[in-house]
Image: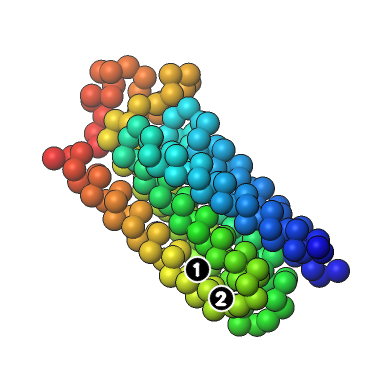
Amino acid sequence: MSFMEFAVQASVIFIGLSILAIFLRLVIGPSIEDRIVALDLLSANAIAFIAVYSIQKNTTTFLDVGIIVALLAFLGTVAFAFYLGRRKKT
Amino acid sequence: MMEVLSGVLLLLGTLFILLSAIGILKMPDLYTRMSATTKASTLGIGLVLVGTIVYWQDFGIASRALAIIVFLFLTAPVAAHIIGRAAYFGDVPLWEKTKINEFGNTDEDRANRDV
């Protein structure tokens, strides 16, 4: 087992653990803003997972998916915040 | 040599991602949680993607990964600012040990602020 294989395995395990922790916050989050922040961080972790997965499986196709996920995460966050602001004002 | 550098970058990025996950679980209120998540997650993802670039050493991969990095570095502060603003004006409570609240510390001040 080379150092690179060890690094990739450790990265996969620890990114998976962080996704579990963030999912816990997504479930228990007291306010709706907490859940939006958790969703944003969850998609960020998905991008990191995609990058590590592309090294592990020796394919490069999935990095395009990362770009799309980054785009959709930002749009979703902005849309959620926009409608939250409108709801609280009226 | 390049593989070792790539592995070190991957492990560093994973460390930052794990720290941000611990931060979002353990921090006391929404604003400190956001401070933990936005900074650490952009830095962590940046390091992981730089590790990917170093591992592949290919122009197509490098351009795609750099596009993700630039896009994240542009959008993460904007998204954090928008959520923070919506949360503050939506009366999400601050931590009870917060010292400085720029829009006033009393209920009267909070009622009189112009949104």
Image vertical order of residue B89 relative to residue B54, above or below: above
Q: Which residue is mark 1?
A: A66
Q: Secondary structure at mark 2?
A: helix
Q: Is residue A79 visible?
A: yes
* Badge 2: chain ID: B
Seen at 33% across and 35% down, the residue is A31
Q: Quadrant of the C terminus of chain B?
A: top left
Q: Amino acid at mark 1?
A: Gly
Classify residue A51 by image quadrant.
Answer: bottom right
Name the one closer to the observer, B70 or B13: B13
* Badge 1: chain ID: A
Image vertical order of residue B104 relative to residue A75, above or below: above
Q: Is residue B10 visible?
A: no
Separation of marks 1 and 2 at Cα, in angstroms: 9 Å
Seen at 55% across and 46% down, the residue is A18
Q: Which residue is mark 2?
A: B64
Name the one closer to the observer, B108 or B57: B57
Where's residue A28, x and y in %?
Answer: 38, 34
The reply to whether discs 1 and 2 touch (Cβ–Cβ < 8 Å) is yes
